[in-house]
Image (spheres, rainbow, N blue to C red):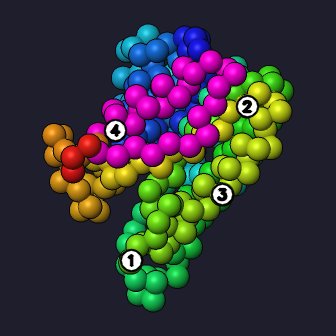
């Protein structure tokens, strides 16, 4: 599918997977709006995107705050003019046993990873339906396929993302909207490095650019074809 001239919104787009995806999109001629909470990083990323010759913008909001999301998406659409692609990438993680993790932290992970994805999708979806075409890429994790000790909050949120995505896919196929759920294993993102779950070894650990390439490949499929889900693993970790 021709990607040049398309318009995309990427949540959590100032670093990690979101930034790598934004850059990959810009290289294909896609105009990009990124969201996040750190204005300095957002501005720096937008400058990089504009240097690649596309229209780029940013909006500051917490995906877990519905009122902020509603206004933020309106602002983005006003500047982009329309939207064709949504990448729900924003997410947070923390690890600890179910009993040891503070209730507030458990709740925050669910609010950001599940409700945040719901809020953003709810606000973007009407635009895609009106155009009778679009793509939604939802980022889950292999932690959403299998739970492990000390990952109860994160795994629960990513399991929920998969269920929500599968249901949405079946709702909007009639509107020519493709919904793809991606479940990557460990990638050397800023978050993964900060949590100490990988050393980021470029020879063995997946890099954000690998994931971005997968997303571009999904979007390039002919409109008659839809990849419902995919897992990305390192070859020899």
Secondary structure beneath dot 1 equals loop
- Marks 2/3: CA–CA distance: 17 Å
Which residue lies at the image location 18% right of the left edge and 40% below the top edge? 202
For mark 4, what is the residue? 208
Quadrant position of residue 131:
top right
Q: Earlier in the sequence, mark 1 or mark 2?
A: 1
Q: Is residue 58 visible?
A: no
Which residue lies at the image location 54% right of the left edge and 20% below the top edge? 220
Provide the residue span drawn in magenta: 207-234
Query: Is residue 208 part of the magenta span, yes or no?
Result: yes
Give the position of the N terminus as an image quadrant. Answer: top right
- Marks 3/4: CA–CA distance: 24 Å
For mark 1, what is the residue? 150
114 is higher (above) or lower (below) than 200: below
Q: Earlier in the sequence, mark 2 or mark 3?
A: 3
Residue 177 shows which numbered tag? 2
Q: Earlier in the sequence, mark 1 or mark 3?
A: 1
Q: Is residue 173 left or right of residue 144?
A: right
For mark 3, what is the residue? 163
Which residue lies at the image location 41% right of the left edge and 16% below the top edge? 27
Secondary structure beneath dot 3 equals helix
């Amino acid at each position: 599918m021709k990607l040049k001239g398309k318009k995309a919104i990427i949540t959590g787009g100032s670093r990690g997977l979101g930034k790598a995806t934004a850059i990959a999109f810009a290289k294909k001629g896609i105009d990009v709006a990124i969201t996040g909470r750190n204005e300095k990083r957002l501005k720096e990323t937008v400058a990089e995107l504009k240097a690649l010759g596309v229209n780029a913008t940013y909006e500051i909001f917490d995906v877990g705050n519905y009122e902020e999301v509603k206004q933020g998406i309106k602002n983005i659409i006003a500047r982009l003019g329309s939207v064709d692609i949504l990448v729900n990438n924003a997410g947070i993680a923390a690890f600890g046993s179910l009993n040891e993790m503070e209730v507030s932290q458990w709740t925050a992970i669910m609010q950001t990873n599940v409700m945040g994805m719901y809020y953003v999708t709810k606000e973007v979806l009407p635009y895609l339906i009106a155009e009778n075409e679009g793509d939604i890429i939802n980022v889950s994790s292999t932690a959403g396929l299998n739970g492990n000790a000390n990952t109860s909050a994160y795994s629960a949120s990513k399991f929920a993302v998969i269920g929500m995505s599968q249901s949405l896919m079946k709702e909007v196929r009639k509107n020519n909207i493709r919904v793809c759920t991606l479940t990557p294993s460990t990638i050397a993102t800023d978050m993964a490095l900060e949590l100490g779950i990988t050393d980021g070894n470029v020879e063995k650990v997946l890099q954000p650019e690998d994931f971005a390439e997968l997303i571009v490949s999904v979007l390039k499929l002919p409109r008659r074809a839809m990849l419902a889900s995919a897992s990305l693993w390192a070859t020899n970790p």
